Amino acid sequence: MLSEGLAEKKQHLREKLRFRRKHFAANLDAVARLTAFRAVPGPVAAILADQALVAAYVAWGDEPDILPMLADQPELALPHHAERVETMDFRRWVTGDALVKGPWGTDQPATAAEIATPSFIFCPLVGFDRRGARLGQGGGHYDRYFAAHPTALRIGVGWSVQEIDAVPAEPTDIALDAILTEQEFIITGDRL
C-alpha cells in the first residue's frame, strides 16, 4: 500500500508536470510540431525490426502523438480497458480501423478486436528520470501489465520537459528500458 506521504508527493509532481507538459506542447513552434515524433530514431528502428508486435497508445491531450511515427508498422496493439477497473489489456489495431471511447475517456480499439500480447510497448508518461522510473497517471495500469508481462520491452514516451531528477518510486513501480523524447533516446536499463 502506498504511504500517504508518497501518494501526496506523487500527486503534487503529476500536477506540476502536467502543467509543464501542457505549456510546452502549446508553445511548440511550427517546425518542432511538424517534426516531433514523426520519424522512428535509428536506434529504435533497429529494435523495432526484431519485434513481433509493437504496442503504442492514442495520444490524449498534450501527450506526444506517436502513431504517425509508427505508420509503417503493419499492425499495432493499443491499450484497452473493458471497464473502469485496475487492469488493462492490449487489442490489435490497424491504422484506419475505428476507435471507440473507453471507460476512462480515451480512444481504444473496439472490444471485438483480438487481444494481443506485444513484445515491445511504447507507453505515455507524466514524468520520468534517467534511471527509467516513470510517473504515470496514477492508476497503475501499465505497472500491473508490465509486472504480468516482464519480457516485453518498455519504452516511455514524453516531452523532454517531463524529466525530473528522481521519480519517487515504490516496489510496484516497474522501470522502463528506455525513454523517447523529441530530443533524445535514453537507454535506462540493460535489456537494449
Image: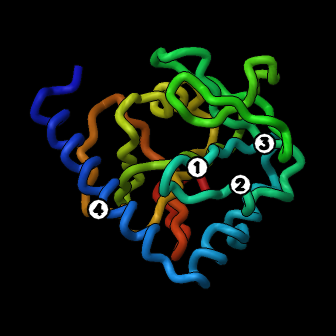
| Quarter of the image with the N terminus in it | top left
The Cα–Cα distance between marks 2 and 3, rounded to whole angstroms, is 9 Å
x 32%, y 63%: residue:
20
- The answer to whether the residues at label 4 and label 3 have Cβ atoms under 8 Å apart is no
Graded by Cα atoms within 10 Å as few (under 14), some (14 to 19) or many (20 or more), the crowding at tag 3 reads: many
Q: Where 114 sits versus 177, above or below? A: above
The Cα–Cα distance between marks 4 and 2, rounded to whole angstroms, is 25 Å
Q: Where 54 sits versus 147, above or below? A: below
- The answer to whether the residues at label 2 and label 3 have Cβ atoms under 8 Å apart is yes
- The answer to whether the residues at label 4 and label 1 have Cβ atoms under 8 Å apart is no
Q: Position of residue 59 (x, y in %)?
A: 58, 49
- The answer to whether the residues at label 2 and label 1 have Cβ atoms under 8 Å apart is yes
Q: Is residue 142 rendered to the left or right of residue 56?
A: left
Amino acid type of the residue tagged 1 in the rendering: Ala
Upstream in the sequence, badge 2 or badge 3?
2
The Cα–Cα distance between marks 4 and 3, rounded to whole angstroms, is 30 Å
Q: Which residue is disc 2 drawn over?
A: 67
The Cα–Cα distance between marks 4 and 1, rounded to whole angstroms, is 21 Å
x 74%, y 37%: residue:
77
Q: Position of residue 55 (x, y in %)?
A: 69, 42
Upstream in the sequence, badge 4 or badge 1?
1
Graded by Cα atoms within 10 Å as few (under 14), some (14 to 19) or many (20 or more), the crowding at tag 4 reads: some
Upstream in the sequence, badge 4 or badge 3?
3
x 39%, y 50%: residue:
126
- Which numbered circle lies on residue 164? 4
- Which quarter of the picture shows residue 131? bottom left
Q: Which of the two marks, 4 or 1, is nearer to us in this view?
A: 1
Graded by Cα atoms within 10 Å as few (under 14), some (14 to 19) or many (20 or more), the crowding at tag 2 reads: some
Q: Which residue is disc 3 drawn over?
A: 76
The Cα–Cα distance between marks 2 and 1, rounded to whole angstroms, is 8 Å
Q: Which residue is disc 1 drawn over?
A: 59
